[in-house]
Image: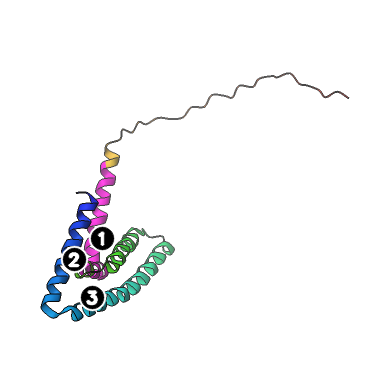
Amino acid sequence: MPVFVLLLIAIIAELAVIIAVGQAVGALWTILLLIVVSMAGVALLRRQGTRTLTSFSEALRNRRDPSPEMADGMLIGVAAALVLFPGFLSDVAALLLLFPPTRAVVRKRLLSRAQARAKARVAHHDVVDGEIVEDDPIIIDAPRIEPRD
């Protein structure tokens, strides 16, 4: 599906949920609830971002594979975009990405799909063993030009 269609579906779904919540609890409470959920998301975003950055630097310092931390950083970035997008569905998705156990599930799937794609890419290329042979460089005796006095 094109990205435009997915974005349009997301906007329509967000509006439908906001209208439904607004009808159930009132417009003022709906706006207040949107603000509170977004503020909670921003606070959690700061905390998890700092924690992930610390884990990433520790992985580099200990010469350990930083892929999980990099994936976490990417997922936290997606969560940041979702927190900024107004609506309940995007905030819930952001909170799920910011909550470490659910983010770990998404990270695991993301990394396994990336590894499978990398293996598939390598499998499609032929590798030919060979060696590089260098011939002796040809030395050409060029005439010397002497400067005139």
Residue placed under numbered mark 2 in the picture: 14
Disc number placed over residue 34 in the picture, else none = 3
Marks 1 and 3: CB-CB under 8 Å?
A: no
- Residue 66: give x, y in percent of width and height: 36, 60
Q: What stretch is highlighted in magenta?
A: 92-120
Q: How crowded is mark 1: few (under 14 residues within 10 Å), some or many (20 or more)?
A: many
Q: Which of marks 1 and 2 is nearer the N terminus?
A: 2
Q: How crowded is mark 3: few (under 14 residues within 10 Å), some or many (20 or more)?
A: some
- Residue 123: give x, y in percent of width and height: 27, 38
Residue placed under numbered mark 1 in the picture: 107
Rendered position, 28 above or below 101: below
Query: Seen in the image, is 52 located left or right of residue 7?
Result: right
- Residue 117: give x, y in percent of width and height: 26, 46
Query: Which residue is drawn at the image coordinates 34% and 74% (left, top)?
Result: 47
Q: Earlier in the sequence, mark 3 or mark 2?
A: 2
Secondary element at tag 1: helix
Give the CA separation, mark 1 to mark 3.
27 Å
Query: Seen in the image, is 111 located left or right of residue 138?
Result: left
